[in-house]
Amino acid sequence: MSLDRARFVPLLALALTAGLLAAEAQAQPKPAPVKIGLLKLTSSAPIFVGVEKGFFREFGIEPELVYFQAAAPIATALAAGQLDVGATGLTAALYNIVLGGEKLWIVADKGREWPGYPLVAIVVQKEMWDGGLRSIRDLKGKRIGVTQLGSTFHYHIGNILEKDGLTLTDVKIVPLQAMSATVEALKGKQVDAILVPQPFPAAAEAQGFGKIMAWAGDLYPWQIATIFYSGKFATDRARAVAFMKGYVKASRYYFDAALIQKDGRTVPGANYEEVVAVTAKYTGARPEIIRLGFPFQDRNGRLLVPDIERQMTWWAANGFMKKPLPLKSIVDTSFVEEAVQALDR
Amino acid sequence: MAVERLVVADRTAFLRRPDYRTLRVLALLGLVVLWELVTRTGWVSSLFLPSPTGVLAEGIDMVTSGQLFVHLARSLERLAWGFGIGVVTGISVGVAVGFFSLADAVVQPIIAATFPIPKIALLPLLILWLGIGETSKVAVVALGVFFPMVISTYTGVRQADPLLIRAAVSFGAGRWSVIRKVILPSALPMVFAGLKLGAGTALLLLVAAEQIAADAGIGFLILQSGNLMETTKLMVGIVVLSLLGLLSHWGLSGLERAVIRWRHT
């Protein structure tokens, strides 16, 4: 087939059209995805639900999930500009980042330690449980594994010990840097007890190397995890509010499915099996493990603001922070309020 | 009689190495000044790069509160034990391997097989065997020091100048005199090279060991400050490490000059 004049002109027209269409597509830039830092935990279920059900996309936000092995590195990545949104626990590192001059905003609830709702458990070695290690007082002098110093687990065990008349100095805190390493350390008997969030406690019991001594939320409730925005993302008001709308919608879906209680016991609500399946898919844990329980959070994602102040005071009193920050320099509830109002209209 | 002057240019002049002592000091100071400017103008955030004045202030704070000495004392204790054990065993085995071909035949292959293993990689294994207490930390430092000491010692012993040995023997020296007065002293420069290498390795391994299951020490301080994002304290830890490395190098060089009086270092 030779390229004679009869064919040349139509072919040229085709090429030009194709070129123009491509240019047209290029001319409309797609909005950059919103990078969300989180861990593969049951408590990230609202985010998983939001991504899977397209709630973020509904409001024009393309979510991109970036997984980590501990909460504090998420705050660091946010400060370094590598993430837009953090969806994880409040750590001393996060507060120190703001104290050090970087802007970061705590904007919504993503998990509370609450009585009756399993989130973090104190898991002890099966042998030690059988040998009589049953109560908080028995933890005196024991090695307790956590992910990092200044983590939510560090805060939690410190406050739990204080309630029973003990202090952090009565135990040996062993930082293991990653969630997986913490679980391995209990398995390998390098520590006597660990604090880990769902699904790891149930998995440890199922695999037989650990025994849940207590759900930490039953012993000390607090605002453990939140959604936080990088300083830069917070200034992009339109996108920040759009993300929040998707999040509040996901939060309500999650609450109605997994957190409804009747007579003091959690009963499966609307779309419960779907939420279990989505959580199992993203965390990689088996559905039976997930079904043990979901962590509590406010249906609309509203924060327990005074608890944040209490946290900073405790960190500062125990030498992990130089001094507490004023709430208004770290908490911004305007995003969640605007999103709730928009959704209720 | 006319004197003819022939100008001979020193054509090796380009190989001369002037000391430039003031320039060395100025270069270091210049870097510190640049660092301070970069953080003070806000070009780099002080969270990501604490300023020298900030680090100094934090360091003074930690010294006066006694916090720094707690960490430093624990680190130095572990270093002393690890370095000491590593040096003593290293020199002993090295001398044995250098003198006795039986020892050489048995030990050399083992050293050749185990030396390339990065000691940091052995740390989790040592913790498994020896627990998360002091023993595993001292053991990993000792192991890291042992290998350079063994290798440098037996190399030093083996490379004693045969001419000097024959000279000593021809002057009537017996076996032990030759060992004591010729072979061991001529091995000393290599031993000191091993010591300097070992000191660096010891510091490296100590910090690595202190980042796993410790509750005090410079390595732990760095880990804790990193976990808590207290970057100024982290820099204080790094500066202290740098000073430790510098001091150990100067100390060993000074000791070398004192002991090896017949040689320019």
Image (tube, coloured by chain):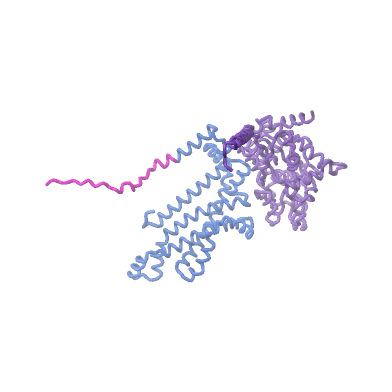
Chain colours: A purple, B blue
For residue A165, side relative to residue B59 (left or right): right
For residue A301, side relative to residue A265 (left or right): left
Q: Nearer the viewer, residue A3 or B61?
A: A3
To which quarter of the image does residue A341 belong?
top right
Residue at position x 39%, y 64% in the image = B160
In this rendering, does residue A231 appear at all?
Answer: no
Q: Nearer the viewer, residue B8 or B21?
A: B8
Is A51 part of what is drawn in magenta? no
User: Residue B86: percent from the left, percent from the top?
Assistant: 52, 59
User: Residue B149: percent from the left, percent from the top?
Assistant: 48, 60
Which residue extends farthest right? Answer: A263
In the displayed structure, B229 sits above or below A188; it is: above
Magenta part of the chain:
B1-27
In the displayed structure, B220 sits above or below A95; it is: below
To which quarter of the image does residue B129 belong?
bottom right
For residue B164, side relative to residue B238 (left or right): left
In this rendering, does residue B133 appear at all?
Answer: yes
Q: Main secondary structure of the magenta part?
A: loop
User: Residue A77: percent from the left, percent from the top?
Assistant: 63, 40
Which residue extends farthest left? Answer: B1
In the rendered picture of this protein, how many numbered marks are placed on residues?
0
User: Residue B73: percent from the left, percent from the top?
Assistant: 56, 50
